[in-house]
């Protein structure tokens, strides 16, 4: 009995440590964002009084004058479009790789892996120059295209891993039972493939949502600047002080929905992140 | 595969049409991946051989390897290489140890497994720039709470010195990426046959012996894949440094140097030389990993 209790205590300590490790910065951001301006430098981890002024200032002035609304729209739009296109292209490729025999299959997988290791900074200069002459600089497509390139390897690997697990014979079985090919695909294969597709979509979205390097290099205004880039250029009352409260509030607004989403679909995300890590 | 069922004359026609379909399905993704990697890196090489400064467009022209000579003989480049490698080695080492600890806790937890997995995913879901701001505000002498903690001087200026800045940068990087490391290691951990531990226990092996003699050797592939991805990722460190110091106090990384030359100073020639050199460094690191450890490339997975 003594041993069981001791183990229990050790695990409790381990779990508490992991929890603290993961949560402290998030709680800190939330508490910072709720401090009234005059208390922002009080150094307290938990605010002594709560105010929503920082959040109000983010949305003040409507879409034209708010420093936050347009970047938020850009971030959501760009990440969503990237996700839809990347998942479509990756699904085609992953279907071929998982199900069909053709020369060049290993080359595509190795190439995708090489691109996953590619340093984005090496493409920033050429893209900056090319986008300016093509009229893509500071536009949505100007960011969507590089995001596609760098998220496709991840999407392909995740989808191939999921597609290989699908019992494709069921499709033929359904056709033998009298289903048309399109019915067999919609009623049998689609429901089986959906979890994998959804997992890949979450990972691609988080990738595009997170990017900073392309977002500050290939944009110059609110026309396409996303939230991470906009945060770095937020200005305070005077140009020498960082508007800590507004940045914290904006950070909370773009963080909390993603965290809720991630926690809700955690099983899928873990499966996706580790897909292919164990088996080739 | 149903292809095996048919060996009749129709098989080769069928194989051919299967190949054609496969290539058609893969073509869009392959083109999209090459469009923003192969072509730009070729273009970067072309740019790096020229003098192109967008502020002085009239002085453009072919200069051969002059840009490379300029970069490789500058003290700044080598200082930044040192900074990048230093940050890479410290953060990946800490991540490996911490990630392994978290993976073991997740794997062996008697209870609360769900809670741990949930909390570990939080850093993964947070934008790197946001995490960098959170830690910057926490350590800043005016807004932060860290200096009010016991054992830390109230007036400690973390971003006033080189290695204290590095400490905060490493901390932010470790916080953000350890979960990814832990999950990859956990995936390797669950493939180990539990019977091995039971047998070792019967033979009287201590917990530490079981870890070093069974867990570590069997996890070697998973550890190497995780290390390779995190090392390459850490070499590209940009967001956290940009937010925290913008390279002040000699904390610049090679990616920050590339950005400064290309985007801030609009010196496309010199900046492209830096870009190509970074590309070569990444290539070299990947090559050393694959060569040195014999990691099979297709055992890996793209970074998240």
Image: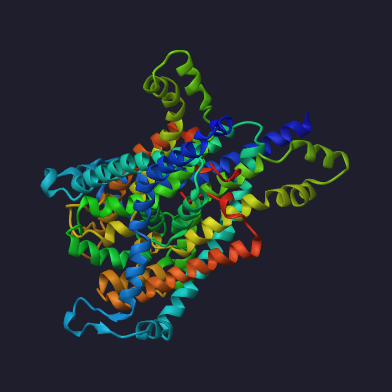
Residue B256 percent across, percent down from the top left:
37, 69
Which quarter of the rendering shows the N terminus of chain A?
top right
| Residue A191 appears in the figure | yes
Q: Residue furthest front?
A: B9
Vertical placement of A173 versus B277: above or below? Answer: above
- Between B24 and B51, the residue placed more toward the observer is B24
Residue under the image location 19 percent in, 45 percent down: A69
Residue B133 percent across, percent down from the top left:
36, 55
- Between A170 and A56, the residue placed more toward the observer is A170
Residue under the image location 22 percent in, 58 percent down: A219
Residue under the image location 34 percent in, 85 percent down: B64
- Residue A91 position by quadrant: top left
Q: Residue furthest right?
A: B203
Residue A218 percent across, percent down from the top left:
25, 60
- Between A269 and A259, the residue placed more toward the observer is A269
Q: Is residue B2 left or right of residue B274?
A: right
- Residue A60 position by quadrant: top left
Q: Is residue A95 left or right of residue A124?
A: right
- Residue B165 position by quadrant: bottom left
Q: How is the image coloured?
A: rainbow
- Between A35 and B160, the residue placed more toward the observer is B160
Q: Residue furthest top?
A: A177
Q: How many marks?
A: 0
Which quarter of the rendering shows the C terminus of chain A?
top right
| Residue A34 appears in the figure | no
Residue A37 percent across, percent down from the top left:
25, 50
């Amino acid at each position: 009995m003594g041993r069981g209790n001791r183990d229990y205590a050790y695990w409790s300590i381990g779990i508490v440590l992991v929890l603290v490790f993961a949560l402290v910065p998030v709680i800190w951001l939330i508490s910072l964002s709720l401090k009234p301006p005059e208390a922002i430098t009080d150094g307290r981890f938990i605010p002594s009084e709560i105010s929503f002024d920082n959040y109000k200032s983010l949305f003040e002035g409507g879409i034209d004058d708010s420093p936050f609304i347009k970047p938020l729209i850009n971030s959501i739009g760009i990440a969503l479009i990237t996700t839809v296109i990347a998942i479509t292209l990756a699904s085609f490729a992953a279907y071929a790789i998982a199900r069909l025999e053709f020369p060049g299959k290993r080359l595509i997988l190795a190439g995708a892996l090489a691109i996953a290791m590619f340093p984005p900074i090496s493409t920033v200069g050429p893209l900056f120059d090319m986008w300016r002459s093509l009229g893509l600089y500071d536009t949505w497509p100007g960011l969507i295209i590089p995001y596609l390139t760098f998220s496709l390897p991840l999407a392909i690997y995740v989808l191939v891993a999921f597609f290989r697990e699908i019992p494709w014979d069921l499709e033929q079985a359904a056709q033998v039972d009298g289903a048309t090919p399109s019915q067999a695909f919609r009623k049998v294969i689609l429901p089986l493939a959906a979890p994998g597709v959804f997992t890949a979509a979450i990972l691609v979205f988080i990738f595009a949502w997170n990017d900073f390097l392309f977002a500050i290099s290939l944009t110059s205004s609110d026309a396409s600047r996303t939230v991470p880039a906009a945060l770095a250029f937020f200005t305070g009352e005077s140009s020498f002080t960082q508007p800590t409260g507004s940045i914290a509030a904006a950070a909370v607004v773009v963080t909390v929905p993603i965290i809720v989403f991630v926690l809700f679909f955690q099983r899928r995300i873990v499966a996706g992140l580790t897909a292919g890590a164990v088996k080739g | 595969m149903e292809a095996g069922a048919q060996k009749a004359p129709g098989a080769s026609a069928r194989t051919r049409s299967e190949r054609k379909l496969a290539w058609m399905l893969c073509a869009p993704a392959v083109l999209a991946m090459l469009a923003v990697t192969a072509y730009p890196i070729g273009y970067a090489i072309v740019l790096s051989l020229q003098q192109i400064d967008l502020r002085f467009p009239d002085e453009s022209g072919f200069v051969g390897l002059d840009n490379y000579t300029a970069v490789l003989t500058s003290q700044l480049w080598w200082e930044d290489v040192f900074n990048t490698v230093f940050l890479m080695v410290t953060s990946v080492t800490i991540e490996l140890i911490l990630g392994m600890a978290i993976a073991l806790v997740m794997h062996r937890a008697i209870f609360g497994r769900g809670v741990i997995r949930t909390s570990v995913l939080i850093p993964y879901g947070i934008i790197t720039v946001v995490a960098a701001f959170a830690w910057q505000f926490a350590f800043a002498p005016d807004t932060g709470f860290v200096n009010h903690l016991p054992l830390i001087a109230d007036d400690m200026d973390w971003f006033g010195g080189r290695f204290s800045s590095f400490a905060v940068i490493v901390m932010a990087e470790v916080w953000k990426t350890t979960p990814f490391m832990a999950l990859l290691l956990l995936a390797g951990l669950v493939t180990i046959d539990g019977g091995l531990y039971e047998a070792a226990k019967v033979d009287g092996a201590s917990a530490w012996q079981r870890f070093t003699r069974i867990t570590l050797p069997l996890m070697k592939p998973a550890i190497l894949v995780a290390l390779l991805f995190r090392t390459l990722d850490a070499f590209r460190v940009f967001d956290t440094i940009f937010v925290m110091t913008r390279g002040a106090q000699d904390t610049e990384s090679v990616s920050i140097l590339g950005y400064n030359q290309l985007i801030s100073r609009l010196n496309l020639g010199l900046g492209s030389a830096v870009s190509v050199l970074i590309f070569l460094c990444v290539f070299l690191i990947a090559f050393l990993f694959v060569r040195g450890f014999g990691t099979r490339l297709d055992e890996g997975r793209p970074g998240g």
